[in-house]
Amino acid sequence: ASPHPTLKLPFLNLYKSHIVELSQILNIQDLVAMTHSCTELLSERCRFCFACDERAWSFRENGMRDPGRL
């Protein structure tokens, strides 16, 4: 459930790999390319934090290339 009544979090209980899979099914890779997961850097990926590792794992799990900027 959302911590705020007007905030919707439909993907909260999904693994990131499931979200990546949905992006492929819905053909919204352009939208995914604009997302940012890194918790260490603001405009790129450090490739070392948990969020970067999880993002990379998610795309590998789905046999996809990450369309986001490195």
Image (cartoon, grey):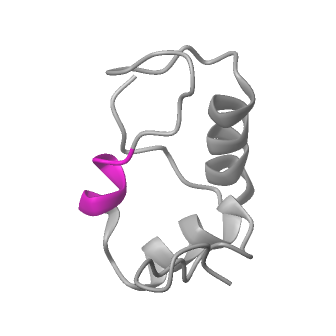
Region in magenta: 30-35
Residue 50 % position (x, y): 75, 30
Residue 68 lies left or right of residue 13; in this view the side is: left
Residue 3 % position (x, y): 61, 73
Image quarter of the N terminus:
bottom right
Question: Vertical placement of 47 versus 62: above or below?
Answer: above
Judge whether residue 32 is colored magenta.
Answer: yes
Question: Vertical placement of 69 versus 47: above or below?
Answer: below
Q: Secondary structure of the magenta portion, mostly?
A: helix
* Residue depicted at x 53% and y 29%: 38
Residue 28 % position (x, y): 31, 72
* Residue depicted at x 47% and y 43%: 66
- Circle count: 0
Residue 35 lies left or right of residue 8; in this view the side is: left
Judge whether residue 14 is colored magenta.
Answer: no
Residue 25 % position (x, y): 46, 84
Image quarter of the C terminus:
top left
Residue placed furthest toward the front: 4
Question: Vertical placement of 42 versus 55: above or below?
Answer: above
* Residue depicted at x 54% and y 77%: 9
**Is 47 in front, or is 39?**
39
